[in-house]
Image (spheres, rainbow, N blue to C red):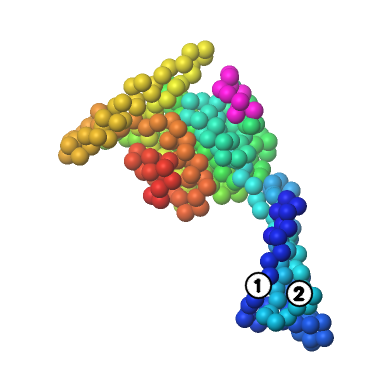
Amino acid sequence: MRTGGIENNTKMSSSLSYAAAISRPPSSPSLTSTSLFSSALRSHFCNTISDTNRFSRFGVKCSYADAGIKDTNSFTIDVEANIKAERLVVLGGNGFVGSAICKAAASRGIEVISLSRSGRPGTLGSWEDQVSWITGDVFYVNWDEVLPGATAVISTLGGFGSEEQMQRINGEANVIAVNAAKEYGIPKFVLISVHDYNLPSFLLTSGYFTGKRKAESEVLSKYPSSGVVLRPGFIYGKRKVGDFEIPLDLIGEPVEKLLDATSSFTKPLSALPASDLILAPPVSVDDVAQAAINAVKDDDCFGVFTINQIKEAAAGVKV
């Protein structure tokens, strides 16, 4: 195999008829199958592709020989294949959760584009130079500058405010993003939503929850076999607010460990209304980020993920 200028010639003995045909001496009448086979391979792997997609190219060089046939009688097949590189768009990429997702993706060699109203964040670390920061609003952005060539979109859009504001940012903004991604043929969409804390239905009528659920419905309807909805509870980590850093992990991490250790005792209480306000374990922002990235990379991953499933997905466990 030749990748990046490195070539390995592999000689294999095969009982398959096409390998024998390729390996026959030049006088054999079946030589025509060699050129046809080579042409078919080259045609199959070198299909015309869209200019908007980004690809890596590698070459493969193989030699087939039957047992007892000298190497000089074997034929070489050169194969060139185009492999699509991963290109991730993160909506709200400079926020608390969004920046953790951008960092996790960049560390795994994924090309990352962040779209947010404030653009490039303050100092986060050297990894931020590996992200393309675009300033824009999903309600007015020119998607031609953001989505072409993307292989997945992760939305962290959400917030608090008046009922109207929460419906707009938690619901409408995400609906617009989902439909734009679908229109541009993006194969994967991941939404960071919220756990419902086992609240009574009348408490779930606020713009925050109804907006989130509206966005979830849009993801699952437009992407029935590839859309992912993550429903974390309280997310902890070191959260930057202006020039200050709030160490939410000092609270979240010990509470998470305590609730995980006592889950067998507290599980019977989970049936009580609003019990998860106390019993739902917090989730590390790094776990949410890793779960989102693993969901992007796993073609078989789709559907709604609970808090425990988010942790399993972060650890690379099949959910």
The residue at the far top in this view is 243
Say which residue appears at 70% left-offset and 82% top-offset: 68
Residue hosting label 2: 71
| Vertical order, 279 against 160 (above or below) | below
Which residue is located at x 52 percent, y 12 percent?
243
The crowd level at tag 1 (other Cα within 10 Å; few <14, some 14-19, many 20+) is few
Camera-side residue: 215 or 196? 196
**For residue 208, side relative to residue 135 (left or right):** left
Q: In the image, which residues are magenta?
A: 120-129
Q: CA distance from mark 1 to mark 2?
A: 11 Å
Q: Position of residue 215 (x, y in %)?
A: 45, 38
Residue closer to the observer: 39 or 15: 15
Amino acid under disc 2: Asp
Q: Residue at x 60, y 49 (%)?
A: 185
Task: Tell me if I can see residue 164 in this picture.
Answer: no
Q: Circle 1 is placed at which residue position?
A: 12
Q: Quadrant of residue 281?
A: top left
Q: Is residue 97 above or below residue 150?
A: above
Q: Secondary structure at mark 1?
A: strand
**Is 238 included in the stretch rendered in magenta?**
no
Residue at (48%, 29%) from the top-left corner?
Answer: 97
